[in-house]
């Protein structure tokens, strides 16, 4: 999800948004993200297509990338980059909120819409 880090989402330094959320793995992660849209807290949004494409919008020009689930994490690849970046994903108990957590505990929270 390199586009999220490039999109300059705010990383929460004082408290973790994800503390009271449920970790998603395997099929639950696939089901949650497939054909879902995330509205990030910075007004950017991302759609996860069933065919493995993802569209990230941070303004008027959307970016297209690829997504997959690997080792119970969400992974994305944004051309022209060839590397995949992976994130732990957690969801609120009511399913309305989601957060992607990077390798350095950076958090990207948003509202989940199916």
Image (cartoon, rainbow, N blue to C red):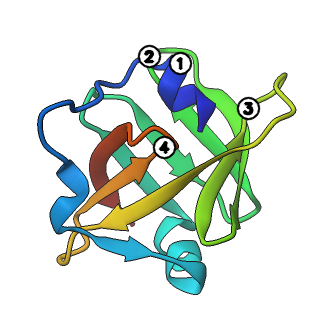
Q: Residue furthest front?
A: 104
**Image quarter for residue 73?**
bottom right
- Cα–Cα gap, marks 1 and 4: 13 Å
Left or right of 81, for residue 43: left
Nearest to N terminus: mark 2 or mark 3:
2
Kindly report the distance in space between the C-alpha atoms of the residues bearing marks 4 and 3.
Answer: 16 Å
Marks 2 and 4 sit apart, C-alpha to C-alpha, by 23 Å
Describe the element under mark 2 as helix, strand or loop: loop
The tag earlier along the polypeptide, 1 or 2, is: 1
Q: Position of residue 90 (x, y in %)?
A: 36, 64
Q: Counting other residues with Cα less than 10 Å from the Cα at mark 2, is it few (<14), some (14-19), or many (20 or more)?
A: few
**Image mark for residue 59:** 2
| Image quadrant occupied by the C terminus | bottom left
Q: Quadrant of residue 50?
A: bottom right
Mark with earlier residue (2, 4): 2
Sequence order check, earlier mark of 1 and 4: 1
In the picture shown, does residue 72 fall above or below 4? below
10 Å crowding of disc 1: few (<14), some (14-19), many (20+): few
Residue where numbered disc 3 is placed: 78
Secondary element at tag 4: loop
- The residue drawn where x is 81% and y is 36% is 83
Q: Is residue 98 above or below residue 4?
A: below
Q: Quadrant of the N terminus?
A: top right
Q: Is residue 14 left or right of residue 90?
A: left
Assess disc 4: are there few (<14), some (14-19) or many (≥20) residues with their C-alpha within 10 Å of its C-alpha: some
Residue to which mark 4 is pinned: 102
Sequence-wise first label, 4 or 3:
3
In three-dimensional space, the C-alpha distance between marks 1 and 2, rounded to whole angstroms, equals 13 Å
Judging by the rendered image, the residue that carries numbered circle 1 is 6
Q: Please state the horizontal and vertical placement of residue 20, each as a whole percent of the image.
A: 16, 67
The spot of residue 56 in percent (x, y) is: 55, 33
Q: Nearer the viewer, mark 4 or mark 3?
A: 4
């Amino acid at each position: 999800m390199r586009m999220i880090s490039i999109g300059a989402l705010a990383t929460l330094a004082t408290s973790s948004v994800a503390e009271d959320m449920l970790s998603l793995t395997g099929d639950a992660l696939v089901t949650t993200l497939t054909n879902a849209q995330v509205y990030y807290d910075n007004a950017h949004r991302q759609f996860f297509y069933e065919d493995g494409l993802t569209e990230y919008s941070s303004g008027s020009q959307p970016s297209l990338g690829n997504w997959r689930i690997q080792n119970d994490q969400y992974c994305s690849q944004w051309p022209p980059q060839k590397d995949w970046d992976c994130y732990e994903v957690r969801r609120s108990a009511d399913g309305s909120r989601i957060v992607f957590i990077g390798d350095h505990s950076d958090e990207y929270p948003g509202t989940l819409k199916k």
